[in-house]
């Protein structure tokens, strides 16, 4: 396959799709499947066929559309009408009124049960209107299991562009100009990382895509991998070209069987098409990708532990330096980026680094995907420009707190992050602002809590998570998290005194500063941030100081 | 030979590049506490006792795994480091069941020495008192998990020096244990060569020969280094 053949194939695929008058997208993300989307899809396909409409109506499964707790979702294109909570009984009605009578069905429109007037065009709904989809752009509109569909959505155009028009240096310059920062949590500038790997001269280099998303309540990477696996694959291939690697690994956690299945299918399709493997698009560039499946350890999301896991060893982190960019997988220079970062590469190449850097805040460019969960009316997957306030996310996109209860806190960054109290609802969400509040951006889990949440218990929950997930290699994390958990449990049980709290604070700082890797280094964050913003809840449970308790 | 200039505790040193901070400090009689470090095997930076402050680096770095760089300004003796060394030592003692008075290693134990060095007079954290096994199935040696501090020196020495890889680590968090083969009794191991290197590598009384009683343990951790040096000469 050369460049011309790819263009021809793309035109063929576009022609094929333009024959259809209607497109019915059935959301087949993991959460919609769990509420019965596959039966809906099958029934829809059968019904369309039975009525002889299959020449003008295309029915496809898609990735996540966003409002996950309203699933299963069915979207009609080009009208952009989304129907919620669809069962097999609704199918005939949808076909009749949406496709034949051209009248939307009011009572099953998206958010029909909570909005006074639901929107026929879903893009006008505040849930979508306030969002800006870049990484998730085609998610929910294309069939993740069809490479033709991806080609229609400008698939592999970015790869073709870099291979024929740009040198690796130019690609890196473009990424640097975009000011894209790593979406895995730490926010290291992606262009700089690529450049470091590029500069290390070695016969073998590797690209790793980190899809070991383990934070409780986070499902961004899963949705991207399930909804648009080719986009991630294309991003990895571009990364391989830029840094000079010929081999890539996608490390996906074992709890995501659908993501693994779709990504493996995407690899097969891409190899067959000649956009992956030897002599990509007829050039001298070779790049292949393999999937590695995680075995359930949270610590394997830490880059050095992930590398050890790919090497077939026990997943434990190594001290850095040396950083993976210098000595990573099998001691070779290795580029390791998160799924969402990889998914942002293609639009940056297509539309330019300058375009991307204009979005967001001065220090954090672009958009961020959040997994909105907890006591919020519309939970699901959202993508907003950096700098969107928490209030906009909670009240405009998320539709406010369930039962109009008062907002208490938003937990960002999972077990490595912290809680943002109501006083800071107007914080503009970017890397620096969240760090200033004692939290972190993290991978994008956003758990909204109302006044029924007990913040000490929240801290205890996350500490228990870190205690269980600590790999046990270094002392501060192994024993320190256990000690902190026991002390938090003591406070929850109303058995602690002020000496216990003092010891807890001392341990928290100690574990944060001395741990070997990021897991231990950030494990005290939920504790420290709740202590900072909700200290009164700790004080209420603590008895008077005991003199001479030692 | 080219040398680089570094500062340790406000004193200037000319050292060869490529060495770790720990090596440089030991050569110059600057005390750095360690537990998981053993000359002759790879460093893993697990015990976090050798952490040092480096100017311009916002994290504490382990001296055993960090190489010296030109013009590095290193501090090994700040109040913060001393405080953290003490907490680490306390956590070592609180984690499992260390009872010096009945231990074979009493008087020769590196953990005990560490306690003296950091001035440990009491432990402020609750003892965890885990239920630990004592594996005495091997004909000559005993593995007592109550005294293990998970430094993994035995694991590394078995893998890197003896090449047997009898020892490995299982579980996560505070439930980690050193295991023989796939967690079978040591005596049934098909990989163990009974060489006894793990016994000499062990800093505490966790691995010891059967024929001794309290305080009689005579470990020679330095034989690992000697062995590796002799091997290197042969090559």
Image (tube, coloured by chain):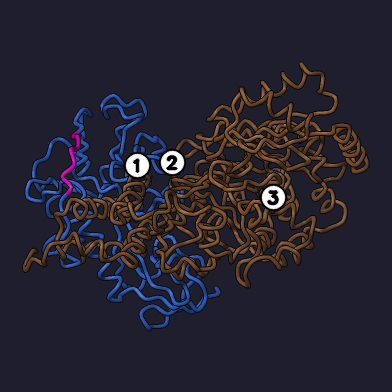
Identify residue for label 2. Answer: A297
Magenta extent:
B128-134
Figure label count = 3
Residue under label 3, please give it.
A123
Q: How far apart are marks 2 and 3 (CA)?
A: 39 Å
Nearer the observer, A107 or B41:
A107
Q: Position of residue B28 (x, y in %)?
A: 35, 73
Name the residue beneath numbered marker 1: B172
Marks 2 and 1: in contact by CB < 8 Å? yes
Front-lying residue, B28 or B117: B117
Colour assignment, chain A: brown
Crowding near the residue tagged with mark 1, few <14, some 14–19, many ≥20 C-alpha atoms within 10 Å: some
- Label 1, label 3: how far apart the Cα atoms are: 46 Å
Label 1: chain?
B
According to the rendering, which colour does chain B have?
A: blue
| Local crowd size for mark 3, using a 10 Å CA cut-off: few (<14), some (14–19), many (≥20) | some
Residue B172 x, y percent position in the rendering: 35, 42
């Amino acid at each position: 396959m050369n460049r011309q053949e790819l263009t021809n194939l793309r035109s063929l695929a576009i022609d094929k799709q333009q024959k259809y008058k209607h497109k019915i997208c059935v959301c087949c993300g993991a959460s919609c499947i769990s509420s019965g989307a596959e039966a809906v899809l099958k029934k829809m396909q059968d019904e369309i066929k039975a009525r002889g409409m299959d020449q003008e109506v295309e029915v496809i499964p898609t990735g996540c559309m966003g409002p996950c707790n309203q699933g299963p979702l069915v979207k009609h294109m080009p009208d952009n009408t989304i129907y919620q909570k669809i069962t097999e009984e609704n199918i005939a009605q949808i076909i009749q009124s949406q496709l034949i009578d051209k009248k939307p069905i009011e009572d099953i429109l998206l958010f029909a049960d909570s909005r006074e007037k639901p929107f026929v065009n879903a893009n006008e709904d505040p849930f979508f209107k306030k969002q800006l989809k870049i990484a998730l752009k085609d998610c929910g509109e294309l069939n993740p299991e069809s490479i033709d569909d991806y080609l229609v959505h400008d698939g592999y155009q970015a790869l073709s562009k870099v291979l024929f028009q740009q040198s690796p240096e130019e690609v890196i310059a473009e990424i640097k100009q975009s000011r894209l920062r790593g979406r895995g949590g730490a926010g290291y500038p992606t262009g700089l990382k690529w450049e470091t790997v590029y500069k290390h001269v070695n016969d073998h280099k590797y690209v790793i895509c980190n899809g070991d998303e383990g934070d409780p309540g986070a499902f961004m990477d899963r949705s991207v991998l399930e909804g648009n696996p080719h986009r991630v694959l294309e991003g990895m291939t571009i990364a391989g070209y830029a840094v000079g690697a010929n081999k890539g690994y996608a490390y996906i956690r074992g709890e995501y069987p659908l993501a693994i299945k779709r990504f493996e299918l995407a690899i097969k399709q891409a190899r067959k098409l000649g956009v992956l493997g030897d002599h990509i698009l007829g050039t001298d560039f070779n790049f292949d990708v393999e999937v590695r499946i995680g075995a359930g350890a949270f610590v394997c999301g830490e880059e050095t532990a992930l590398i050890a896991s790919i090497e077939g060893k026990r997943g434990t982190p190594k001290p850095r330096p040396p950083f993976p960019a210098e000595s990573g997988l099998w001691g070779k220079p290795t580029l390791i980026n998160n799924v969402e970062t990889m998914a942002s590469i293609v639009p940056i190449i297509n539309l330019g680094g300058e375009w991307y850097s204009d979005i967001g805040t001065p220090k954090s460019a672009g958009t961020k995907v959040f997994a909105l969960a907890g006591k919020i009316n519309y939970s699901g997957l959202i993508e907003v420009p950096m700098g969107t306030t928490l209030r906009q996310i909670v009240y405009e996109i998320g539709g406010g707190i369930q039962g109009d209860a008062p907002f208490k806190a938003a937990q960002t960054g999972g077990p490595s992050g912290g809680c943002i109290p109501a006083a800071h609802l107007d914080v503009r969400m970017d890397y620096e602002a969240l760090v200033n509040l004692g939290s972190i951006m993290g991978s994008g889990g956003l758990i909204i809590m109302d006044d029924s949440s007990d913040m000490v218990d929240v801290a205890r929950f996350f500490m228990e998570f870190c205690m269980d997930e600590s790999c046990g290699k270094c002392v501060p994390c192994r024993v320190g998290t256990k000690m902190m958990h026991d002390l938090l449990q003591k406070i929850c049980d109303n058995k602690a005194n002020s000496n216990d709290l003092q010891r807890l604070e001392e341990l928290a700082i100690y574990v944060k500063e001395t741990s070997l890797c990021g897991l231990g280094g950030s494990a005290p964050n939920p504790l420290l941030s709740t202590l900072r913003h909700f200290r009164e809840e700790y004080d209420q449970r603590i008895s008077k100081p005991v003199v001479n308790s030692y | 030979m080219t040398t680089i200039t570094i500062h340790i505790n406000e004193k200037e040193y000319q050292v060869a590049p490529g060495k770790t901070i720990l090596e440089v400090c030991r050569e110059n009689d600057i005390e750095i506490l360690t537990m998981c470090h053993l000359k002759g095997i790879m460093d893993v930076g697990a015990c976090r006792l050798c952490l040092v402050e480096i100017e311009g680096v916002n994290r504490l770095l382990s001296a055993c795994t960090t190489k010296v760089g030109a013009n590095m300004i290193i501090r090994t003796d700040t109040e913060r480091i001393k405080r953290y060394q003490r907490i680490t030592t306390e956590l070592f003692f609180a984690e499992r069941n260390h009872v010096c008075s009945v231990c074979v290693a009493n008087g020769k134990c590196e953990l005990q020495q560490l306690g003296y060095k950091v001035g440990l007079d009491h432990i402020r954290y609750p003892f965890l008192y885990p239920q630990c096994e004592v594996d005495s199935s091997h004909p000559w040696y005993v593995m007592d998990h109550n005294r293990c501090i998970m430094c993994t020196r035995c694991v590394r020495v078995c893998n890197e020096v003896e090449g047997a890889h009898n020892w490995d680590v299982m579980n996560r968090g505070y439930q980690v244990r050193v295991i023989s083969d796939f967690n079978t009794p040591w005596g049934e191991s098909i990989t163990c060569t009974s060489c006894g290197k793990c016994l000499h590598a062990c800093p505490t009384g966790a691995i010891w020969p059967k024929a001794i009683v309290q305080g009689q343990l005579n470990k020679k951790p330095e034989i690992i280094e000697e062995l590796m040096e002799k091997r290197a000469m042969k090559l």
